[in-house]
Image (cartoon, rainbow, N blue to C red):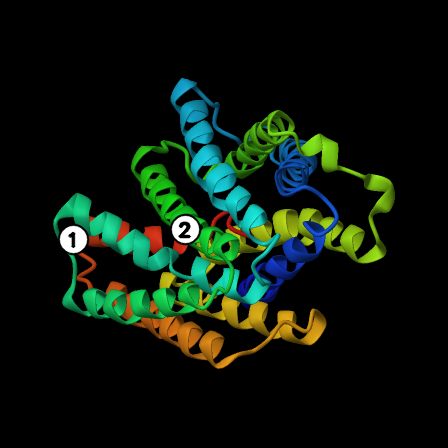
């Protein structure tokens, strides 16, 4: 079952970039992302309460503060920006940029702990030029801006993951992701409404593909994908689970080419290969750290937990 769940994470989370790309062609990005997470959270929370009643620790003020921080950093800034960017960016390019999350996390933790492995620096040295090459190929100013926003949102996701592991007293509580989805969904809906997205919302004009992509994001991406991740991360070694970081973009690029006929240019191949190789180097550096050091243990856990809720 552990490996079945991991394979689900590999392919389901890789496919969500395709779902977002299709859905935002018919729905405003923030209203799409916000309603998607709100619906998923409203479905997931009662289900958890029904099956785990009496086994969940009580939530206090610090728990709700942590849930709000995570909702803002991971969902609103992280996934909300990805949805906004995919109005112009292809799903494959977006997925490759998001694959830099482990690099961001290692840099952030290295800054906080003043410890970083030389092999990890090599990973960063390989990955960043690949990202620059990939982003620099965007032809229009709008696409370039959105690509840079995705890179920044990946940094916000990484920071939110580091912060969550340092602050969350009950981070393994299964209610956390459901409540984060509810909070993040509400915030994105409010921001989308205030920014005028309601004026461009025409549900009657949604085609079959957009509806299918939207439903896939709710059921497969948020509910099934995250549940599978939660089981895998508790039952498999961290280094094994972390393989999602370089398999997701491969799946996203392949699906984008096959189903949306997105161009597979040499720029995508070279830049994408550099990013994926850098993530592999980073994860190897993470595994090479001595397990007896508390800070190193935190880095290992953070690199894996960076996927939590990033479905995307």
**Circle 2: element type:** helix
* Residue placed most toward the observer, 127 or 85: 85
Residue 283 visible from this viewpoint: no
Determine whether, in the image, residue 60 is placed left or right of residue 28: left
**Circle 1: element type:** loop
Residue 179 visible from this viewpoint: yes
Rate crowding at label 2 as few (under 14), some (14 to 19) or many (20 or more) other CA atoms within 10 Å. many
Query: Residue at the top extreme?
Result: 61
* Residue placed most toward the observer, 232 or 266: 266
x and y percentages locating residue 146 in the rendered image: 49, 51
Q: Quadrant of residue 225?
A: bottom right
Please give the name of the residue rendered at 41% of the width and 33% of the height, measured from the top-left corner. Answer: 170
Residue underneath mark 1:
293
Q: Quadrant of residue 42?
A: top right
Please give the name of the residue rendered at 44% of the width and 73% of the height, measured from the top-left corner. Answer: 272
x and y percentages locating residue 90 in the rendered image: 58, 63
Residue underneath mark 2:
154
Relative to 68, residue 259 above or below: below
């Amino acid at each position: 079952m552990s490996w079945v769940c991991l394979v689900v994470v590999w392919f389901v989370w890789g496919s969500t970039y395709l779902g977002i790309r299709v859905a935002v062609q018919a729905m405003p990005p923030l209203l799409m992302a916000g309603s998607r997470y709100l619906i998923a959270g409203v479905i997931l929370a009662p289900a958890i309460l029904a099956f785990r009643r009496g086994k969940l620790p009580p939530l206090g003020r610090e728990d709700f503060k942590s849930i709000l921080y995570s909702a803002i950093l991971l969902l609103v800034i992280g996934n909300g920006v990805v949805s906004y960017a995919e109005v112009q960016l292809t799903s494959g390019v977006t997925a490759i940029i998001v694959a830099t999350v482990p690099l961001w996390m290692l840099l952030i933790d290295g800054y906080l702990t003043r410890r970083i492995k030389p092999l990890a620096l090599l990973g960063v040295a390989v990955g960043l030029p690949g990202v620059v090459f990939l982003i620099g190929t965007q032809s229009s100013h709008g696409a370039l801006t959105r690509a840079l926003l995705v890179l920044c949102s990946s940094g916000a996701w990484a920071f939110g993951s580091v912060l969550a592991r340092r602050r969350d007293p009950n981070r393994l509580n299964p209610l956390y992701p459901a409540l984060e989805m509810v909070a993040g969904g509400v915030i994105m809906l409010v921001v989308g409404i205030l920014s005028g997205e309601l004026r461009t919302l025409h549900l009657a004009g949604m085609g079959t593909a957009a509806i299918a992509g939207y439903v896939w994001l709710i059921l497969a991406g948020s509910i099934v994908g995250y549940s599978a991740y939660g089981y895998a991360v508790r039952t498999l070694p961290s280094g094994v689970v972390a393989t999602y970081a370089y398999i997701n973009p491969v799946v996203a690029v392949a699906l984008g080419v096959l189903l949306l006929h997105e161009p597979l240019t040499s720029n995508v191949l070279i830049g994408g290969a550099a990013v994926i190789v850098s993530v592999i180097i980073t994860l190897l550096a993470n595994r090479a750290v001595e397990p007896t050091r508390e800070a190193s243990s935190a880095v290992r856990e953070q690199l894996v937990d960076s996927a939590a809720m990033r479905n995307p």
